[in-house]
Image (cartoon, rainbow, N blue to C red):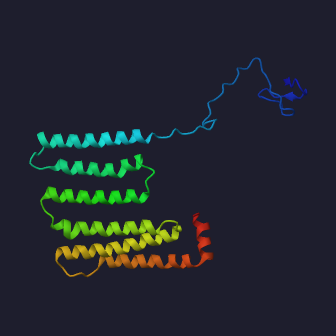
Amino acid sequence: MSYCVNCGVELEDSASFCPLCHTPVYHPGRQAPQEKPATFPQERQEVEDINRRELAVLLSVTLLCTAGCCILLNRFLLSPRLPWSAFVAGACGLLWVWIVPPLLKRSLPALAFLLLDIAAIGAYLGLIAFLLHGTSWLYDLALPIWGGASVLFLLAFLLARKRSVISRTMLVIAGVGLFLLWLELLIDRWMGISYRPQWSLIVAIACVALLIPLAIIRMRPNLRRQVRRRFHF
């Protein structure tokens, strides 16, 4: 039986410190316990910033190599008469417009990037029509769909700025309902049948049913505060 060298209290053989004065206990015959590595960092460390320029170069080279390999395969090995590689190259260019400019020019407003993305989608649709040697579907279906979706995106982007979560949710739901009505109208016109909304009308009614309670919550401040506390936004 051992005793504490500081206060003299009797210690158990397995004690590592005195229970009275908390003095560390040293046992000459016991092997010193090895310290286990910590399961979490002991010091706060900052995550290194990503070099956006290097990332943009890497993505550009990857997309360029993908497009170039497809063009070479199409030209010399696989179906040289069918220019399928042009579709892949156009898609790579579209991805480049979506990803690389925001990495390099962060100072530009978000609206500029949105307009650039919309223009890139329109250019890709034009490329598809050029490669397929047909423009009827482009003018009668694709471009109107692209135009309607672009207008709704721009309106939602401009109107949703500095608004509450409920207001932005209402804008998204209303935009979805209007776009689907517009889409069924274009499809019926392209197929040469009279416009009789069916599935889009069902979705629009469902959107209206969702908008009504959101509008009530938005107009009643007390109820809005309760919803915010409940869902933490």
Q: Residue furthest left?
A: 81
At x 35%, y 60%, the residue is 115
83 left or right of 45? Answer: left
Quarter occupied by the C terminus = bottom right
Q: Disc count in the image?
A: 0
Give coordinates of residue 5: x percent, y percent. 87, 23
Above/below status of 66 relative to 222: above
69 left or right of 38? Answer: left
Quarter occupied by the N terminus = top right
Instruction: Pick the residue in front: 173 or 141.
Output: 141
The part of the image, by quadrant, that contains residue 232 is: bottom right
Observer able to see residue 77: no
At x 47%, y 69%, the residue is 169
Q: Residue furthest front?
A: 108
Observer able to see residue 12: yes
Q: Residue furthest top?
A: 28
The part of the image, by quadrant, that contains residue 19 is: top right
Give coordinates of residue 100: x percent, y percent. 36, 47
Above/below status of 157 relative to 30: below
Instruction: Pick the residue in front: 25 or 96.
Output: 96
Q: Residue furthest right?
A: 7
Give coordinates of residue 24: x percent, y percent. 80, 27
At x 44%, y 71%, the residue is 171
Above/below status of 76 relative to 118: above
120 left or right of 165? Answer: left
Give coordinates of residue 99: x percent, y percent. 37, 49
At x 15%, y 64%, the residue is 135
